[in-house]
Image (spheres, helix red, strand yellow):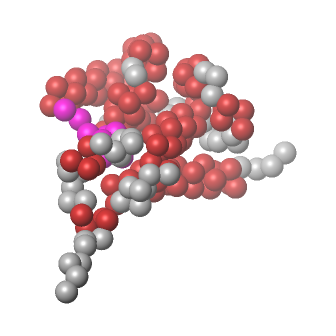
Amino acid sequence: MAIQRPLFNEALQSISSGLFTRSPGLTLNDLVHLEPHQKFHLSHLEEDVSHAQSRKDHFKLAQIALQLIQRSPNSTLYKIISNSPLISELLSEKRYNALWNNRLGNHDQRSKSPTLHTHYQQWQLIFLKEQYLPWKESPLAYHASVSSLKQEIQRIEMITDNHNQLRPSN
């Protein structure tokens, strides 16, 4: 009687398994997970944003946005906008497109996607696609933890596609 081997996905118990820790890239869960010190910092940041919004202090809001966009690493910035609807809403405003454009820098994708709603969404899409790239050809590409990353990419693409279809043509 032959021993039946478990399916690949069944053998992968959790994201903390030895096999998964040697994986090619980060999952969506990795990208949005906050450590306690990061949660503490984020709550203070949200407090500052909320206070500035309530006082209609556009200068303070612009300072916060400028600091986040210019100084935060991509992974930190993605964690912040993923965990804070308040900050995400602030940074998605069209007035910050120039800052996102600067952050996008020399990405070739920028010129290929001129119809996206905002540079904010374009940055999110490029960042997530870069995170997914190492997984694409991996044997782990169809694991549930990786699928959530691919689904998030598809969600953002769908939002931008829907926006582009609703936009009046010239």
Q: Main secondary structure of the magenta part?
A: helix
Residue sitting at 25 percent across and 59 percent down?
12
Q: Which x, y percent locates residue 50?
A: 31, 27
Residue sitting at 38 percent across and 55 percent down?
140
Q: Nearer the viewer, residue 148 or 2?
A: 2
Q: Nearer the viewer, residue 16 or 115?
A: 16
For this orientation, the residue located farthest to the left is 36
The image shows residue 148, relative to residue 49, as above or below, that is below
Place residue 109 in its image quadrant.
Answer: top right
The image shows residue 119, relative to residue 67, as above or below, that is below
Residue sitting at 84 percent across and 45 percent down?
170
Q: Which x, y percent locates residue 73?
A: 40, 22
Determine if the magenta segment contains residue 74.
no
The image shows residue 100, relative to residue 128, as above or below, that is above
Q: Which x, y percent locates residue 153?
A: 50, 50
For this orientation, the residue located farthest to the right is 170
> Is there any visible trace of residue 96 in the rendered image?
yes
Side (left or right) of 122 relative to 6: right
Side (left or right) of 87 relative to 130: left
Side (left or right) of 30 relative to 120: left
Side (left or right) of 29 relative to 141: left
Q: Nearer the viewer, residue 99 or 77?
A: 77
Residue sitting at 46 percent across and 30 percent down?
91
Place residue 76 in its image quadrant.
Answer: top left
Q: Which x, y percent locates residue 169?
A: 80, 49
> Is there any visible trace of residue 148 in the rendered image?
no
Q: Which residues are magenta?
A: 28-35
